[in-house]
Image (cartoon, grey):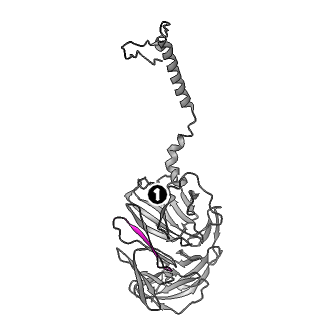
């Protein structure tokens, strides 16, 4: 192998090509020095090439794992995760006892940590399936309209409503209604409309019932065109039954005086004690959070270029999970989204690890139990993943589902994309 073909010194003399020619001039020390130097360089190269690559190889996969393992918020300008197999990297074990409802013709409980599925008692098999709404301490369940029923010009009947406690094995019937809304702890609001009328223009009759089905007061006539979104400690939060395109205005309505105490544009989340809404964006978009007990209002400023898609309060009321969308598109054509956690006391935002994704990957998210564990369902090419995260943790708990044939629709919380 020829390493040198005759280099020149600064004085113009040629250094002999001792490695290629094999000669050795004893009259000068330079050839030996050249040989020693070249040999040392070659030795160093060989040693470096044989060093273990464990410190270099992970760097190539770090981008896929960093969103999961690092507590540092994801760079806002980074590309969203579009991995075909889903999120990779170190993960925590699925929290013991945390299970999810599965809706369908015959709803079930699904335990991601063990893979076990158990029927939810008290719910008869229903061709149109059931709708789940998160309420304090459990779920309000209502039968979906049976659009396949062939009854000619008959009027659709009121639909059955049930309550399923978080740890219960069976649901309890609570009444019949056209719509159901969460009430205070231990109650639900059932609303019915006159037959063959448009709820967008009619006045519904609402009644509060306990989660055991006992009436808690006389029927209440709602303002025309509105339905109950959430019962709060300061009245009923009403939303248009048939919202028009554009900004939707909700009303905080006091039943005893039949008067509005406040209006909110674009409500994104509500609980019995708090309301969050997203006003029109100025230089930056914001989420405003109002504590109904204290009257204190807190603002969470979103990163530049972000807007709010949906949100959900945690059971403790300490956090608001916010799905934010980015103005640029993801590689797969979907919009880039990120789950952020806003502290309701300070408005401080923290990125949820592993959730800088394409909007096509984020199926749903929410707080499906009485503890502060945020659950998200993510869909990728190769599998569906369920993630669980407790605020402050640096990693997610992840369960991969290779097939969803026996799980028609998982219920993670308030919102489904």
State how many labels appear.
1
Q: Is 224 on the left-hand or right-hand side of 92?
A: left
**Whole-percent x, y for residue 234 in the image:** 48, 84
In the displayed structure, would residue 289 be above or below residue 217?
above
Numbered disc 1: secondary structure: strand
**Quadrant in the rendering for residue 98:** bottom right
Q: Is 273 on the left-hand or right-hand side of 114?
A: left
In the displayed structure, would residue 375 be above or below residue 140?
above
**Quadrant in the rendering for residue 326:** bottom left
Spot the residue most to the top: 27
**Whole-percent x, y for residue 89 in the image:** 56, 51
Residue at 42% x, 56% y is 76
Q: Is 129 on the left-hand or right-hand side of 335?
A: right
In the displayed structure, would residue 36 be above or below residue 62?
above
In the displayed structure, would residue 18 be above or below residue 97?
above
Magenta region: which residues? 283-297
Queried whether the magenta region covers residue 295, the answer comes back as: yes
Residue where numbered disc 1 is placed: 357
Queried whether the magenta region covers residue 155, the answer comes back as: no
Residue 333 visible in rendering: yes
Between 385 and 371, which is closer to the camera in this rendering?
A: 371
**Whole-percent x, y for residue 170 in the image:** 64, 76
Residue 404 visible in rendering: no
Between 162 and 187, which is closer to the camera in this rendering?
A: 187
Instruction: Tell me the crowding category of disc 1: few under 14, some 14 to 19, or many 20 or more residues within 10 angstroms, Cα based.
Output: many
**Whole-percent x, y for residue 114 in the image:** 65, 61
């Amino acid at each position: 192998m020829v390493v040198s073909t005759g280099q020149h010194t600064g004085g113009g003399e040629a250094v002999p090509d001792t490695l290629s020619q094999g000669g050795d001039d004893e009259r000068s020390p330079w050839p030996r020095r050249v040989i020693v130097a070249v040999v040392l360089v070659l030795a160093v190269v060989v040693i470096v090439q044989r060093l273990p690559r464990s410190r270099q190889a992970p760097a190539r996969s770090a981008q896929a794992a960093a969103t999961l393992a690092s507590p540092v918020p994801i760079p806002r300008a980074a590309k969203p995760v579009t991995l075909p197999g889903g999120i990779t990297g170190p993960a925590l074990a699925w929290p013991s006892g945390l299970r999810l409802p599965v809706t369908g013709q015959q709803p079930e409980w699904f335990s991601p940590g063990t893979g076990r599925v158990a029927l939810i008692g008290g719910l008869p098999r229903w061709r149109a399936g059931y709708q789940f709404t998160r309420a304090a301490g459990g779920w309000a369940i209502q039968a979906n309209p049976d659009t396949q029923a062939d009854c000619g010009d008959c009027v659709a009947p009121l639909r059955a409503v049930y309550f399923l406690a978080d740890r219960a094995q069976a649901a309890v019937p609570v009444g019949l209604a056209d719509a159901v809304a969460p009430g205070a702890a231990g109650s639900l609001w059932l609303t019915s409309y006159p037959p063959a009328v448009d709820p967008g223009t009619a006045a519904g009759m609402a009644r509060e019932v306990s989660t055991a089905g006992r009436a808690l007061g006389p029927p209440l006539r709602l303002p025309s065109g509105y339905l109950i979104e959430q019962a709060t400690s300061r009245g009923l939060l009403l939303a248009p039954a048939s919202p028009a395109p554009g900004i939707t205005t909700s009303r905080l309505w006091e039943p005893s005086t039949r008067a509005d105490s406040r209006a909110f544009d674009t409500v994104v989340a509500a609980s019995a004690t708090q309301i969050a809404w997203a006003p029109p964006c100025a230089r930056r978009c914001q989420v405003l959070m109002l504590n109904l007990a204290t009257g204190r209002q807190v603002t969470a400023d979103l990163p530049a270029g972000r807007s709010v898609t949906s949100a959900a309060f945690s059971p403790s009321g300490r956090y608001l999970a916010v799905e934010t969308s980015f103005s640029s598109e993801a590689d797969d054509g979907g919009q880039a989204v990120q789950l952020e956690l806003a502290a309701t006391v300070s408005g401080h935002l923290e990125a949820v690890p592993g959730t800088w994704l394409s909007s096509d990957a984020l199926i749903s998210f929410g707080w499906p139990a009485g503890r502060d564990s945020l659950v998200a369902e993510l869909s990728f090419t190769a599998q569906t993943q369920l993630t669980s995260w407790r605020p402050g943790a640096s990693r997610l708990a992840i369960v991969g589902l290779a097939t969803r044939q026996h799980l028609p629709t998982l219920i993670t919380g308030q919102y489904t994309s």
